[in-house]
Image (cartoon, rainbow, N blue to C red):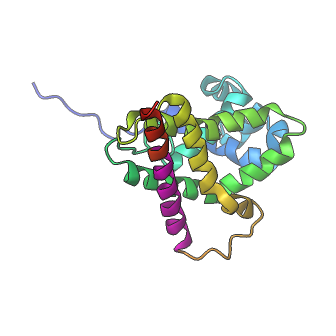
Amino acid sequence: MTTTKKQGAGRPKSEEKKEQILKAASTLFLECGFASTSMDLVANRAGVSKQTVYSHFENKDRLYVAVIEGKCSQYCFDEDNLQLNPEDLETSLKHLGHQFIKLLSDPEVIATYKALIGDIGNNPHIAELFYSAGSRRGRKILADYFVLQERYPIPQDVAEKVSILFFSTLKGEFHIRNLLGLTSEYPPHYFKQHVNQVVEWILLCLAHESNKLSKQ
């Protein structure tokens, strides 16, 4: 018996609508701010019904988190796509560092930071939403990786501290200058050198912490 394959099979309609909603919400959060962006407004901009929006996102908070997570995923900065090899610590950290710099340099991310600062006064809880979906999530991914790698064995609490140090050092002066639009002075080779230097420092830090624990 011959089975005829269905032709023209593409993405499910529900996924297409979800992407439409996320795209619309991302634009509206930047244009109008969190408080002024309603689920009705998102539905109208996305060209779907409000019921469809709620079928994918139970409330506006969850939609906001999904927008932040979606931007991280765009740069493979998530649990499913970030390539961290427990047996190649240096290469993995360099890869992560470059992805993080690219994420921070994205114009939409910069605009989101600025919009967030303007929104916090009226909606302080969105700071926690943003932090949990972005910084805290990235920190946990790296801390879990530090525990898995065997070159410099460290416990979870130390891994958390080194993870924070890694991201904070990567940001350095660059992040605040980026938010202020003062990045024109950075030459093309700066970021490669910066990431390499940060990875070198973190490897020294890991070696120190691992050695200190081994002597206890």
Using the image, determine if residue 135 lies above or below residue 2. Answer: below
**How many labels, in total?**
0
Which image quadrant: the N terminus?
Answer: top left
User: Principal SS element in the magenta part?
Assistant: helix
Quadrant in the picture for residue 24: top right
Q: Nearer the viewer, residue 50 or 159?
A: 159
Using the image, determine if residue 174 lies above or below residue 17. Answer: below
At x 64%, y 50%, the residue is: 168
Seen from this angle, which residue lies furthest left?
A: 1
Residue 117 is a magenta residue: no
17 left or right of 40 in image: left
Residue 195 is a magenta residue: yes
Instruction: Please give the range of residues in magenta.
Output: 189-206
95 left or right of 177 in image: left
Seen from this angle, which residue lies furthest front?
A: 215
62 left or right of 200 in image: right
| Residue 64 rendering spot, x and y as whole percentages | 69, 36
Quadrant in the picture for residue 38: top right
14 left or right of 126 in image: left
| Residue 119 rendering spot, x and y as whole percentages | 84, 42
At x 52%, y 44%, the residue is: 73
Q: Nearer the viewer, residue 87 or 13?
A: 87
Using the image, determine if residue 192 lies above or below residue 137. Answer: below
User: Does the image show residue 168?
Assistant: yes
User: Does the image show residue 140?
Assistant: no
| Residue 19 rendering spot, x and y as whole percentages | 56, 40
Q: Nearer the viewer, residue 145 or 99?
A: 145
At x 55%, y 30%, the residue is: 157
At x 51%, y 48%, the residue is: 205
Quadrant in the picture for residue 182: bottom right
